[in-house]
Amino acid sequence: MASRSRNSLVVPRSAQALEQLKFEVAQELGIQIPADGYYGQMLTRETGSIGGQITRRLVQMAEQQLVGRSGY
């Protein structure tokens, strides 16, 4: 099924890394991602949990990069 997302990646090469992160987070949370890519049968709580954890990790990664650059 084609994605309906209107969001475009600033770095298109990051798509595979983000997809891998999604599967890792889902596995850690004990959530099974549908093999067919259709999320319509998933609970909003499940998809929200995955997205929230991904956001936390990305922010943490960005913070670490900022600290590394500034020398603090």
Image: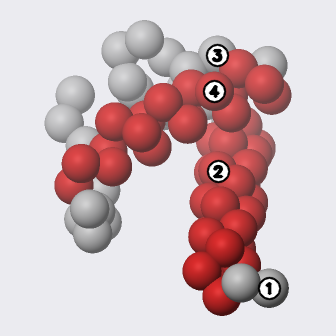
* Alpha carbons under labels 3 and 4: distance apart: 11 Å
Circle 1 or circle 3, nearest the eye: 1
What is the total number of numbered labels drawn onto the structure image? 4
Q: Do the residues labelled 2 and 1 touch (CB within 8 Å)?
A: no
| Amino acid under disc 3 | Gln
**Image mark for residue 29:** none
Q: Nearer the viewer, residue 62 or 50?
A: 62
Locate residue 41, reporting x and y percent.
Answer: 55, 26
The earlier-in-sequence mark between 3 and 4 is 4
* Alpha carbons under labels 4 and 1: distance apart: 30 Å
Locate residue 9, reporting x and y percent.
Answer: 28, 62
* 43 relative to 67, above or below: above
* Alpha carbons under labels 4 and 2: distance apart: 10 Å
Can residue 4 be seen? no
- Which residue is denoted by mark 1 in the rendering? 72
Q: Which residue is drawn at 60% across and 80% down?
A: 69
| Amino acid under disc 2 | Ile
- Which residue is denoted by mark 2 in the rendering? 54
- Which residue is denoted by mark 3 in the rendering? 32
Is residue 52 found left or right of 18 in the rendered image? right
* Alpha carbons under labels 2 and 1: distance apart: 25 Å
* 21 relative to 58, above or below: above
Circle 4 or circle 1, nearest the eye: 1
Q: In which quarter of the image is residue 50?
A: top right
The furthest residue to the front: 71
The furthest residue to the top: 35
The earlier-in-sequence mark between 2 and 1 is 2
